[in-house]
Image (tube, grey):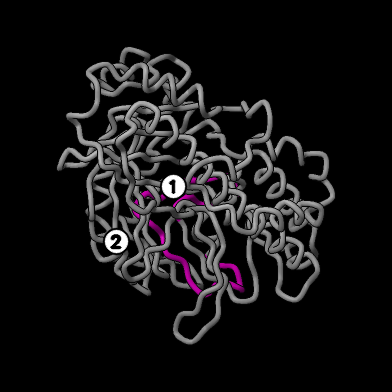
Amino acid sequence: MYTLLPGTRAPVKVWTDPDDIEAEAAKQLRNIGALPWVEGVAVMPDVHFGKGATVGSVIAMRQAVSPAAVGVDIGCGMSAVRTSLTAEDLPDDLGPLRRAIEDAIPVGFHSHDEQVDPRRVRGVDTRGLSNFWAAFDDLHVGVSPLRTRAGKQLGTLGGGNHFLEVCLDTDGQVWLMLHSGSRNIGKELAERHIAVAKKLPHNADLPDRDLAVFLAGTPEMDAYRRDLYWAQEYARRNRALVLGLFVRVVRGMFPQVTLDEPISCHHNYVSEEQYGGVDVLVTRKGAIRAGKNDLGIIPGSMGTGSYIVRGRGNPDSYNSASHGAGRRMSRAKAKKTFTAEDLAAQTAGVECRKDPGVIDEIPGAYKDVDAVLAQQTDLVEVVAHLKQVVCVKG
């Protein structure tokens, strides 16, 4: 159940102890609640301070949207699929499987040498693909030189907290899971529109200029929504292609494998929704949609596992739930706090990188995902608990 964050104009409903919210994040949330266009805010239990706007915030606005409340990785999200494989099918040495995944799917800042044609990857939905790429020419003029790069990055992972995993559920069934977004093109579009919003006169006196908004019926809003929805589609197509390449690797090693229907969900995006008869634009930054019976994915960290959940459709949270465990310390602090030896200990039993380059992703830098789940039992129910045995990071 939620409590109300005091000192706000619009209701800010919090699914964690307000005293546990870091001071910087609480200030961001109060600033959001003060905006005149805000109908209400739902704060997820994985909440933490974010650039521009709070991670773990669901913001319902009337006739307005804040691009920083979406974030720069537009459309970032998760995909997962249960396979017919079981733990007994996996070899004792999972190193070759990890290396095969890394060879097939570029990570970090890398891209494919040539653009991958999704029509040549089994199982990838390519409906509307030609129209999607044709719409690139209508995007913000500043990204026009990035068409080739965007093409080559389709079907790539990225860095930071993005990952590819082979997991086992509590019944020993093998799942494939991934976390990725709209890559560089989404970031470039977001940053350009955030800069535009900050210069608009109606945003001059905001408590936080990072929360600058676009207003409905303006050319700036129309341009942002056009680019936003394109980037959300790019992110969805990127995850689908990454999953297709991932499955290709697994199928090469286990030809007998069959797959269930994949689960996919954004957690940085905008949606047009209605609550209490009021039409609102809902931004979810670090939150998933959890409408009645919606399937979603809530990951922990690279050593603690993840959850498949089913939404309960709670309107108090604008049909939303957390997108993960959430960070409890910054990347910089994690690098100062932990060592490669700590990383190896905290990821024992997982075939993954254990070098200093991913210390900022160490499980100890994240909140307890089980505690996060326990705080939102009115938002989601658990369908499956997964534990990774292979983790690929950028």
Q: Start and end of the magenta stretch?
A: 33-56
Q: Nearer the viewer, residue 343 or 240?
A: 240
Q: Which of 197 and 178 is in front in this view?
A: 178
* Residue 46 is inside the magenta segment: yes
Question: Which image quadrant for residue 217?
Answer: bottom right
Question: Which image quadrant for residue 290?
Answer: bottom left
Read off the residue under disc 2: 310
Answer whether residue 346 is visible to the viewer in this image: no
Residue 226 placement (x, y as % from top left): 71, 62
Read off the residue under disc 1: 78
Residue drawn 47% across and 47% down? Answer: 123
Circle 1: residue type: Met
Circle 2: residue type: Arg
Which badge, 1 or 2, comes first in the chain's sequence? Answer: 1
Q: Residues within 10 Å of mark 2 (few under 14, many from 20)?
A: many
Residue 380 placement (x, y as % from top left): 28, 61
Q: How crowded is mark 1: few (under 14 residues within 10 Å), some or many (20 or more)?
A: many
Residue drawn 26% across and 52% down? Answer: 373
Q: Nearer the viewer, residue 251 or 156?
A: 251
